[in-house]
Structure formats: C-alpha cells, structure tokens
Amino acid sequence: MLLFVERCYLFIMLHRFATSKKLLSWQVSVPKKHLHQKIACIDRSDLKNAKRVVIKLGSAVITREDECGIALGRLASIVEQTSELYLSGNQPLVITSGAIAFGKQKLQQELFMSRSMRQTLITNRTNSKSDSLVEPRACAAVGQGGLMSLYESMFAQYGIRTAQVLVTKPDLYHESSRKNLTSTLNELLRLNIIPIVNTNDAVAPPPEKDLDLAGVISIKDNDSLAARLAVEVDADVMLLLSDVDGIYTSPPGTDGSRLLPTYCPSSDASLVTFSGKSRVGLGGMDSKVKAATWALEHGINVVICNGSAQHTIKAIMSGRKIGTFFTNVQQTSSPPEQQAAQARQGSQILQSLESEKRADIIYSLANLLVDRQDDILAANRRDIEIAKEQGMDGPMLARLILTPSKLASLAGGLRQIAATSHSVLGQVKKHTMISEDMDLAQITVPIGVLLIIFESRPDCLPQIAALAISSGNGLLLKGGSEAMHSNILLHSLVQEALEPHAPKETIALVNKREDIHDLLQLKEHIDLVIPRGSKELVNRIQTESAGIPVLGHSEGVCHVYIDSDSDPSMALNIIRDSKCDYPAACNAMETLLVHRDLIRTSFFDDLLEMFRSENVRVLAGPRLSSMLSFGPPLATSMKTEYSDLVCSVEAVDSVNEAINHIHKYGSSHTDTIVTNDDQRAEFFLQNTDSAVVMRNASTRFSDGYRFGLGAEVGISTTRIHARGPVGVEGLLTTKWILRANGQTVQEFSAGERKYIHQDLPIKESMQM
C-alpha cells in the first residue's frame, strides 16, 4: 500500500500532466506589484477589477467527509483557480485550514502500523473510536509541515512561489507583532509570493467568548482571522469558501429556504435563521456572516460561496452571480426568483380580466407614449449622449435613437394590438363531441411567463409589453444598458397603464446583467425566453438556458434575387429600400443575387451608381469577381450580417441556383425574388426554406407591424411553435376543456357507452 505522502506526490504529478496544455499558456512573466491601489466595488460586476484577493478555505472545503485527510481534488481545483488569478495580475492571499486533518491521518496511520495484529482486530471488531482519536494539537503539529509542503508542490506546477505564515491570537492583538505581520504579508505580495496563512493550532487555546470591542473583531476561527487580515492588508475582496452555496434564509434543505444572492446586514439580518456549526472547524455560517459583516464595515467586499463547486473563484471574479455578495446598499428591486413568481401571479390575474380591460390597458399605454413624449425623448437623449461619449456609432446608435415619428408609429401599433385583443384568449381552435354529454374544446391560453432580452432598441419595450398584456402573459424584460434611462421611463409608463387593472409587477424590468443567468435557471417560473439582438447574444442565451425553450433568430442574412425577367425600375427600388431604409435592422438585405445575364448591362451600371449615391460599400462574391476584370473588392464571407451600408453582390445562373445559395449562406430569415415570371416566382416561394419569402417586395416588410400584427416580440427562424414575425398568436398555447356528466373509461371499455368524436361548430370564444 502506498504511503500517504507518496499518494499525494502521485496525485500532483497526474494533475500536472492533465493541465500541462494550460501551463504552457500560463508560463508568462507577471508584472511586479508595488503599492496596492484599492478598487472600489459597487456591485458584483466591479469584482473583475479587484486586485488583492483574500481566499479563505474552510475546513469543510478541503477536508474529506471522514474528517481525516485532505480532499485533494477540491484543493487542486482551488489552487488552479488561485494560480490563474495570480497569473492574470491579481494578488491572492490564502488563509487555510486542514493541518489537523492532515496530521490526524498521518498519526492514525502510524498508530495502525505500530499495533499488533490482535490489537487491530479487537479495535475493528468493537468499532471503538476512542483509540483512533489523537489530540488535535498534536495532529496540527504533525500536519502543518505536510500541508504546507502540499501547497508548495501544487503551486509550483504553475511556477508560483508560496510562503507559510503561522499566526496566533497575540500576533493580532499586540500592536508591534501585528504591524510586523502586516508588513511581512505586504512584502510577500510585492515579491509575487502567495502567502499561505494558518493559525498555529499546535499551541492554539480553546475557543473564547466573543470579546469584540471598539470595532475590532476578536479572533475565534479562520473566518474572523480572514476578515482581520483582509482589513490589515487593505484587500479588495474576501472570498469565504464554505461547503454551502451562500447564505440561506434558513438551513439549506428546509421548507421555504432560499439562497440570498445579496446580503445587506442592515436590512436582511431578519431574513436569516442560523442553525448549528460547520461539519468540521470552529465556525458555522453565523461565524462567517459576522466576520463578513465586520469586513464590509471596514471597506472589504465579501462573497460567501461554495468552495466545492467547480470554477467558483473564477466565476465570482468575472462578475458572475455566484454565492452571496455582501453590500451596504439595500436592494431596490426584487431578486430574480421573486420577480418571476410575481410575474406568474400577475399573469393569472391578467388573463382573468375581460378582454375589454386588457385592451384598455394597451390603449392607455399608447396614449401615454404620446402624452409623455417630451419626457421619453429627454431620457433617450441622455442615453444617446452617454453612448456617444463611450464611442458608440453606426448600427447600435441608430437602433438606440427615438424620434417623435417613431413614437407616433409605436402608439399606432399598440392601438392596433388593443383593437384585436378581444379575440385572443379563449379562442376555440377545435370543438368535438366525444360522446353523449361529453363536450371537448381546445382553446387558446397564455404561455405563462416570458423573459425577453433585447439590445439597444428601447421602442421594443412598449411593443413587447402590449403583446404580453393582450395575450395575458407575465413578462420579464431585460434591455441593454445603453438604453437604461429610456427603458426605465418606458417601463414606468407600462406599470402606470397596468395598475388600475393588474399588479404592476406583472411586467418587470430586470436591471442587472448578471440576473439573466439566474433567470435562465428558473424553468419552474419562466416558460419561454426570446432574445432580440446579435448572434452572440442569442447563442449565449441558448447555451445558458437550463431547460427553458428559447425562441429567436441568430442573425438576419437576408437576400434579394433579381431574376433575368424583371422590371429594372422595380428592382432598383426594392434593392434601395431593402438595403438603405434601415440597414441596422435584422430584415435589411445583406446579399444581392443577380442573374448572370444582367451583369455588364445598363441595369448593373445603374445598380452600382445607385449604391454609390446611397454610400453603400459593395463587396463582390467569388462568381461575380471572376466575371469582372475590375470592380468591387472580394467579400471575405457570404454569410455576413453587416447591419450597415455594406452589401455583398453575387452572380447566379438561375432561380434554382439562387435558392441553393440562400440555403447554403442564408439564416432562414427573409428572402425575396424580383421577377415578372409567375412560374419562377412560385418555384422560389415554394422552395425557399425561410421564415418569410416574398415576391417583388422589399425585405423590410418582414415585420410584425407591417404584417398587421400590431407589433412583434421578435422574428423567429426556428421551426417549432412560431416562425417569422411573432405577434400575439406566437405568445399563445392551448389547453383542452372537457365538460362531461360522470362518465368513466370503464363504461366505454365494457361497451356500455360509445365514442362519437363528432366535430362541432366552433364558437367565437369560450373564455372563462
């Protein structure tokens, strides 16, 4: 049997081999750190800028479940993450437990080896624990050196030096020794050496009563030690790694217990009930909260998190919503889970309203958009000014801008939605007589709670809200930070319109970007996610969604095909409108396909001249480039969504080749044929597999308002549930209602009753 130290060495070598590829990229020079400049963190997103990080490893994190020995896998993961922080320019300081557990295992092995066979058999038979227990201080004395040697070997894999710092209570209580300790830690950090700090448990006295005096925390355990040292070295953040995910309102696993993503000591203390202490070690969650609160009062940001979870440290330091973040700022908005639950309750009330009342809410919102136009435009101007200061231009800036004409069109679209609200819910889709006195109907109902994430365009907010109100859905909205002031004002108008008839929380605005990840895990509260924005946004939402369906399109690579038999004037007008009317829109043309017979004709010359006059930069496809001796530069890709005054132009031989090109390079969004030939037009319309296919029309018509839907929550290129512009119909599902008179299946099985399955006339509505 391998000895413990040999097993540790073997583990280290295996872990080093497994991470060797990472090590190659990590072996870089780290800039020297001199005077530390403290980072002021307002919320989690600021943690990515933190430099000096105190990482406290609780006993339950690094010791095994049998409390005898180190959990090597967990410790290796923590060392790896800490090394990544260090090699990224951070200054980590580690406060560890584990010396007693390390020494306990070694001493028990020694006792086991020194026993006679008879003693061993007797001990195993009686299952006596008294003989196996060793005095903890002796365990600490034996284990301290081995624990430090293990840390040294693990960090050495990454080319990082460490130093052991053993402290006792007097080291913190006496001014001269405390100054020496602080000076030593600062010097080690300046020299790019990671201090590994532990209490000297070989001489540690028993725990004492809480003696906190004059704002100075007494050292009772490693939590209070970490808080004190974090203040002494002026750390930016302290991570308390525990064996639970953070602070719960009551012990995890009990009924009604929920994790608090943020904790404000002045307002949230009454929400929490503590019970018991840690599985091992001196402290429990109560100890951690007290230490964290004291550190927060002295300017240290604190997160309590689960050190057993993978990549915890990396996730927290990147601003992810992991663990419980301590803050002195009271939360002005509800946590995501509560927002989703309130939206569900609001949806149930909203769908129970008479259709006229839902319409009244939407009419009221449309009127508010007109009456409060000056306020809306003022908020929007503030967003535009900030965006310009931050360097935003082009398509993103164009999407951000609101104008009086936009607001007027928006109000008109909302009134269109309100006018059709009476026929939305309770609409009978199928009506069947199952048997005598058995009436079955399939009716429309809301999906439930929607999470809609959109970028830049603040005009999306009232459109989406109106569609949700009309369809009786609860709604969570997350707009881009670049439109923050516009979104806040527009959302306040939505809630003002709602309040006479339904709870204002039915439609909530999600303020923090990190809340999105949490919301995407709430499949019991959220029924559908609709992202409106870039391909990167949609892909990220699809990746992070934990079982919640995602409806949307990844990009809008729209095509216009000009057939050889087409009207030149009509073709130029359609091309101009498709590309130049609003190039930032997802339904703008990105690729123009031209029949090869039209190349080197007066039409093609007029086309290039029109593009020049509209400041459109033309890029040639491979086929067109080979046909021209000189001309536009070659396009790097035929699958690009430019969202700007840039257009790819390619030559094709036929309508069939145009369709093949669209299927290969398109995004199944919107594609148009311009032709006078009815047969070719029908072939294109029937065989082009896109959400919207047109003949002799601009791609810009692919829009909910222009299709008569009033507005849209987005355009879907998926093939399940809804496709194309998604209006009210796309936010509905169905349920079955069976009205019977005591019949049972057994009666039908025995032949006493017979199925009829007769289709009945469909009534206009069966809304309850």
Image (spheres, grey):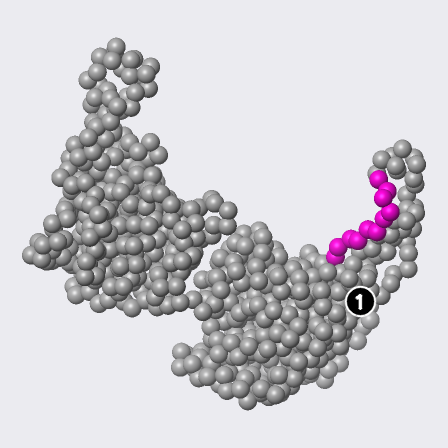
Instruction: Identify whether 748 is placed above or below 509.
Output: above
Q: Which amino acid does label 1 sit on?
A: Glu
Between 254 and 530, which is closer to the camera in this rendering? 254
Q: Position of residue 392 (x, y in %)?
A: 45, 78
- At x 23%, y 47%, the residue is 221
Between 119 and 21, which is closer to the camera in this rendering? 119
Q: Where is residue 557 in the image (x, y as percent from the top left)?
A: 60, 68
741 part of magenta stretch: yes
User: The magenta stretch spans which residues?
Assistant: 734-744
Between 638 and 174, which is closer to the camera in this rendering? 174
Q: Which residue is denoted by mark 1 in the rendering?
A: 682
- At x 17%, y 56%, the residue is 189
Q: Where is residue 649 in the image (x, y as percent from the top left)?
A: 60, 73
746 part of magenta stretch: no
- At x 48%, y 58%, the residue is 517
Whether residue 249 sits left or right of residue 524 in the image: it is left
Question: Callout 1 environment at 10 Å: few (<14), some (14 to 19), or many (20+)?
Answer: some
The quarter holding residue 65 reads top left
Whether residue 726 sits left or right of residue 554 in the image: it is right
Quadrant (top left, top right, bottom left, bottom right) of the N terminus: top left
